[in-house]
């Protein structure tokens, strides 16, 4: 992805989150010089990859296959007492996050406002393929049983709990607008705990055609080490 595209997505995300009265941490507004000025204070943030996260999953078309995320808090397995993580995400109409599951992380996905979020499901079999078995999920604590490949439409305020080894993909329902999505989970590690059904690139290679507006979580080593 071009840095100019990433910067524009960040600016649009700031406006959208502000319209929903969702306020990011103070350091979310920092530029590169601000990060350098706070050197020595930011290890907790950088080591846990908190912050801005924008990906097109290697598709080359963020609006069709892509996701905006901001990791607000996160523990580190084997290091922290903190066993949980939280993210805010923005999902456009028909903007797909591809099929994947997590080996370690259990998570709740929450529609925090805006449009409707469509989530589709398959169980994973012993070979990590899509299983032809019923899918059991909890929607706000109420059990739902879906056919393999079945879908839920989460309206604002609704949530679904997803266990490990549960394939899922999601996107905004057409005609209902952009969705603000929350994630509350066990500790998150996007470098080791994503099993995508089809090969994708989790973190994009960045073409530096302009200066970063804000640093991505996968920029820290590049710009701060």
Image (tube, rainbow, N blue to C red):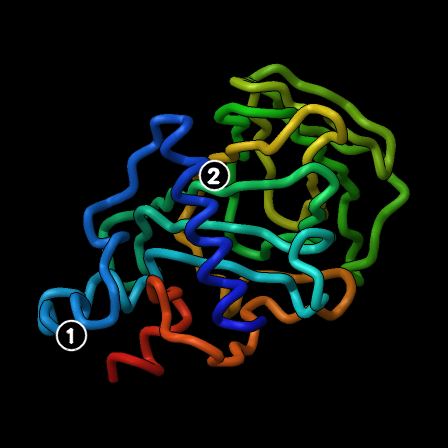
Quarter that holds the C terminus: bottom left
In this image, 129 relative to 168: left or right? Answer: right
Which corner quadrant of the image does residue 170 belong to?
A: top right
At x 72%, y 20%, the residue is 144
Residue 81 is situated, as x and y percent measured from the top left of the image, at: 23, 51
Q: Residue 16 appears at what percent x and percent y?
A: 45, 36
- Determine whether, in the image, residue 213 is placed left or right of residue 115: left
Residue, far right: 132
* Disc 1 packing (10 Å; few <14; some 14–19; many ≥20): some
**Residue 121 percent coordinates (x, y):** 76, 39
Tell how many labels.
2
Q: Position of residue 139 (x, y in %)?
A: 61, 21
Residue 214 appears left or right of 132: left
Query: In the image, is residue 183 above or below residue 34?
Result: above
* Real-space Cα separation, disc 1 to disc 2, in angstroms: 30 Å
Q: Secondary structure at mark 2?
A: strand
In depth, the one of 200 and 136 nearer the eye is: 200
The quarter holding residue 23 reads top left
According to the picture, the residue beneath numbered tag 2 turns out to be 183
* Of the two numbered discs 1 and 2 in the rendering, the one whose residue sits closer to the viewer: 1
Compared to residue 118, the image places residue 47 above or below, namely below
Q: Residue at x 65, y 25 (%)?
A: 116
Camera-nearest residue between 113 and 11: 11
- In primary-sequence order, the first of circles 1 and 2 is 1
The quarter of the picture where the N terminus appears is: bottom right
Task: Check disc 1 and report the residue beneath it.
Answer: 36
Front-most of residues 50 and 178? 178
């Amino acid at each position: 992805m071009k840095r100019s595209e990433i910067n524009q997505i960040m600016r649009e995300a700031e406006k959208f989150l502000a319209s929903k009265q969702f306020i990011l941490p103070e350091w979310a507004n920092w530029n590169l010089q601000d990060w350098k000025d706070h050197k020595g204070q930011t290890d907790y943030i950088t080591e846990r990859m908190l912050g801005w996260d924008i990906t097109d999953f290697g598709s080359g078309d963020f609006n069709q296959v892509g996701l905006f995320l901001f990791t607000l808090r996160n523990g580190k397995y084997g290091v922290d007492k903190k066993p949980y993580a939280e993210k805010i995400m923005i999902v456009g109409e028909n903007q797909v996050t591809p099929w994947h599951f997590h080996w370690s992380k259990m998570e709740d996905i929450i529609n925090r406002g805006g449009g409707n979020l469509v989530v589709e499901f398959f169980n994973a079999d012993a070979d990590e393929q899509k299983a032809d078995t019923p899918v059991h999920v909890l929607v706000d604590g109420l059990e739902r049983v879906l056919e393999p490949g079945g879908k839920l439409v989460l309206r604002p305020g609704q949530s679904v709990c997803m266990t490990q080894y549960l394939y899922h993909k999601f996107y905004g329902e057409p005609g209902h607008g952009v969705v603000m999505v929350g994630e509350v989970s066990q500790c998150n590690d996007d470098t080791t705990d994503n099993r995508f059904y089809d090969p994708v690139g989790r973190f994009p290679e960045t073409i530096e055609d302009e200066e970063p507006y804000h640093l991505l979580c996968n920029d820290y080593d590049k710009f701060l080490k």
